[in-house]
Image (cartoon, coloured by chain):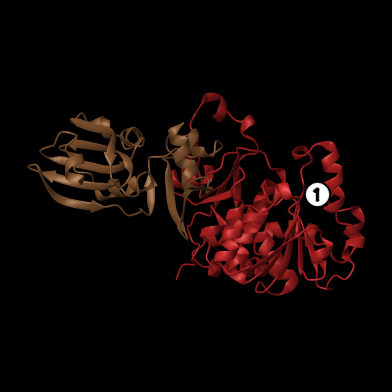
Chain colours: A brown, B red
Amino acid sequence: MAEKTQLQVEAICNGSVIDHIPAGNGLNILKLFHILDNHERITVGFNLPSKALGHKDIIKVENVSLTEAQTNQLALFAPNATVNIIKDFRVVEKRTIALPEKITEVFACPNSNCITHVEHAAISEFKIINNNGKIQLKCKYCEKVFNKEIIIDGVKK
Amino acid sequence: MANSLFHKNIISISELSKDDLELIVHTAQELKAHPRNDLLKDKLIASCFFEASTRTRLSFETAIQRLGGRVIGFSDAGNTSLAKKGETLADSIRIITSYADALVMRHHREGAARLAADVSKVPIINAGDGSNQHPSQTLLDLFTIYETQKRLDNISIAFVGDLKYGRTVHSLSQALCHYNAKIFLVSPESLAMPEYILDEYEANNIEYHIVNTIEEAIKEVDILYMTRVQKERFDETEYRHLRAKFVLTPESFAGAKPNLKVLHPLPRIDEITLEVDKTPYAYYFQQASNGVYARQALLSLVLNEEL
């Protein structure tokens, strides 16, 4: 079934496939992880039917292998996403996503008085805290702790 | 062997270990008993208050000069050309720290001191970054608790007033998590202790009680830590109603333990009546003067491999 859904978006020869993204998050991932910046060919599918999610988004980036750190940073948006690395149209590596220890240069701090909003030298960095299953992010600079949902909602606005 | 704080940045109380805290408290005690005027000899410290804070600045500068060090700096960024010329904070810090052996700084934005530490080659001491951290206040609080109770372990303490925005109570709470404290929280509902601090209590098995009045806690506590409930956070009628509940008077001490001491980060406005000053429980002025010794200890340890 997964195979069939994936083919709703054209196969790629070499690169990375981010699959099982909850529908509506595909654009955010493209933007936040700077996937559009490198001018490689990218094909996307939004609101594809998915057995597990109902609807899902998928992103295929040619000639780019996502690093393990990049893969893990997806965890906050799409904890059940999968990342497959493709070579010669074949999956050579299936990555499962694990929560990273920290996430850098992705999210803006929700605290409007945080120094990161006025100083370019202060690069956004959050430590991830797993508080009995409640995922929270602590800003390296202002040390404020936010629930994951607050940070993600800020991105969607 | 170098002491554990040598050449360290002092940005946040949460980064200091239990051993670090005790080293500072014991050094403060030693410097109070046996003053030294040579520990910062030949050292030049920059004291940069991008946001004005007269008491903290004078306390730091007194500490530096009493230890034989010299000071450069400013008391308010409004008096400098930094803001007017539009230089970034990071560049200002790079320049200033190239002149000095350490930088003591206060800034109105949270995280400013951490950014300074990112770009500085000399130690940064955070003297307050917005509503975030003010570690030297916590150190002087701990020193004063130790001085009055002869111990830090198993202290019973009530925090009273604005527990939501008061960074001093947040930082002191974090430090007391090392010492099996028993904590009473007394505040208006709208100024209650934030959830993340309560989470920290629970993670550290700290016993805490949320109570409505000072009287409910007074018989149990060794330390009553008062803070100011700011008038501007309430409408006038609500404030008048609340005020009575969170004001300390000599009558509030009925049944208090003989070793009880009242602390306050100051300035007090009217939450502690003047009559309380004459009781044996008042210790907030000694606490403020202890700030000099706690800051002397901090600066000495950061700038000397061995004392």
Q: What residue is disc 1 on?
A: B268
Q: Chain of mark 1?
A: B
Towards the viewer: B81 or B12: B12
> Is residue A152 found left or right of B185 in the rendered image?
left
Question: Quick check: B84 above or below B243?
Answer: above
**Residue placed at 55% from the left, 30% from the top?**
B82
Q: Callout 1: helix, strand or loop?
A: loop
Q: Position of residue B184 (x, y in %)?
A: 72, 63
Q: Position of residue B229 (x, y in %)?
A: 77, 47
Q: Please tell me in which quadrant of the rendered image residue B144 appears.
A: bottom right
Number of labelled discs? 1
| Disc 1 packing (10 Å; few <14; some 14–19; many ≥20) | some
> Is residue B167 found left or right of A63 in the rendered image?
right
> Is residue B208 found left or right of B96 in the rendered image?
right
**Residue placed at 21% from the left, 41% from the top?**
A17
Callout 1 amino acid: Arg
Q: Is residue B68 visible?
A: no
Q: Position of residue A103 (x, y in %)?
A: 38, 47
The residue at the far top in this view is: B85
The residue at the far left in this view is: A88
